[in-house]
Image: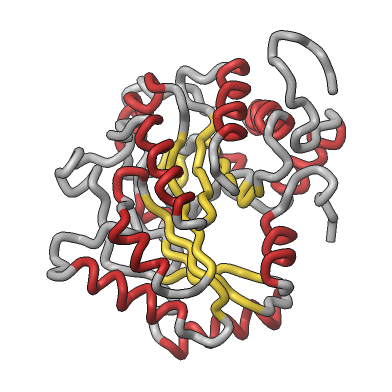
């Protein structure tokens, strides 16, 4: 197995330091929706959204299923402990059919962390779908808590193109709120949006470096079936989708300007082949990570290596 710890700050190494064990995530599920789908902010979702395609297979709904999946990860990957992971839609935002949403969240989260071997909980949500009420529930669990927040970009034009329905300021306010609870925040960002430039990627890195986020998930823009972006694609109105090498290049700009204490949880996204239209280079993720790091090695890219003024041209 290749060791890339000298190139980026990997989440597996971070978890090993925090928990003293080899940690993997287990996907848990709830009855969630999103304020950008239920009419609160919008009803169509983000332009790329096909949440059904991105949902993990629901194969661990029962206690026995959870135990089976734990045993599988122990045998296959040497897992020693687990984090309960909620990523469906906005996982702090129950559907309207849930009568007492706070009671529902408390029972759902508490049940997840009650399983032996669970050492923490990670909840993925939107900046405008997290308040003190949900954070107080998570605080009461008395376990390690991580909040994943979708930022996607700091370019307001691209936020509008996506149809996110929130601002960069709302993201920053949510990070401050989460930080006040001493929880870790992991930001989600997308490379390959219509108005993206090299200078903009550098500005994004600066923004992330100056925020109180602890981790980062990086995705490429994908066209998924049954999304609004698919419709634009068929009409010839979709933005250009990055080639593999162009994605690697932009990823390299971001990573090389990113502080080393920001933990990288993901370098690219993937989706089931049946739901993926573009880019096809991520359809088969076997070897993709190795190709990324091969590119990094050939171009002498390491996390934090080029934290300097984009216009100065000075190397560290």
Residue 274 position within the rendered picture, expressed as x and y whole percent measured from the top left: 45, 53
Q: Position of residue 170 (x, y in %)?
A: 35, 35
Residue 199 sits above or below residue 78 on the image: above
Q: Is residue 287 left or right of residue 228?
A: right
The residue positioned 74% from the left and 60% from the top of the image is 13
Question: Could you say which quadrant of the image residue 48 lies in?
Answer: top left
Q: Nearer the viewer, residue 141 or 162?
A: 141
Q: Is residue 183 depicted above or below 190 in this figure?
A: below
Q: Where's residue 2, x and y in %? A: 84, 56
Q: Residue furthest front?
A: 180
Locate the C terminus by quadrant: top right
The N terminus lies in quadrant = bottom right
Relative placement, left or right, of 112 versus 95 is: right
Q: How is the image coloured?
A: secondary structure
Q: Residue at x 54, y 78 (%)?
A: 118
Looking at the image, residue 23 lies above or below residue 308: below
**Which residue appears at 86% of the width and 32% of the height?**
298
Pick the residue in front: 188 or 137: 137
Q: Is residue 152 left or right of residue 19?
A: left
- Coordinates of residue 286 in the picture (x, y in percent): 69, 54
């Amino acid at each position: 197995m290749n060791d890339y710890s000298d190139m980026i700050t990997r989440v597996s190494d971070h978890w090993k330091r925090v928990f003293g064990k080899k940690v993997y995530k287990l996907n848990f599920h709830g009855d969630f929706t999103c304020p950008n789908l239920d009419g609160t902010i919008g009803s169509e979702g983000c332009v790329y959204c096909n949440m059904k395609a991105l949902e993990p297979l629901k194969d661990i709904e029962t206690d026995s299923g959870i135990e089976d999946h734990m045993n599988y990860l122990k045998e296959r990957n040497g897992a020693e402990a687990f984090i309960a992971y909620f990523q469906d839609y906005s996982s702090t935002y129950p559907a309207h059919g849930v009568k007492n949403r706070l009671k529902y969240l408390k029972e759902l989260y508490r049940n997840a962390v009650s399983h032996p071997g669970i050492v923490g909980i990670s909840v993925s949500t939107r900046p405008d779908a997290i308040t003190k009420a949900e954070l107080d529930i998570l605080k009461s669990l008395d376990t390690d808590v991580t909040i994943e927040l979708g930022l996607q970009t700091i370019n307001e034009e691209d936020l509008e193109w996506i149809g996110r329905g929130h601002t960069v300021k709302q993201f920053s306010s949510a990070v401050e709120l989460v930080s006040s609870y001493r929880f870790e925040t992991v930001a989600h960002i997308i490379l390959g949006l219509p108005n993206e430039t090299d200078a903009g990627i550098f500005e994004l890195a600066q923004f992330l470096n100056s925020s109180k986020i602890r981790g980062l998930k990086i995705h490429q823009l994908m066209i998924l079936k049954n999304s609004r972006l698919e419709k634009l694609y068929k009409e010839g109105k979709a933005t250009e989708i990055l080639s593999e090498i162009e994605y690697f290049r932009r990823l390299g700009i971001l990573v090389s300007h990113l502080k080393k204490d920001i933990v990288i949880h993901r370098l690219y996204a993937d989706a089931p082949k049946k739901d993926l239209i573009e880019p096809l280079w991520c359809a088969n993720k076997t070897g993709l990570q190795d190709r990324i790091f091969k590119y990094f090695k050939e171009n002498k890219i390491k996390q934090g290596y080029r934290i300097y003024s984009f216009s100065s041209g000075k190397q560290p």
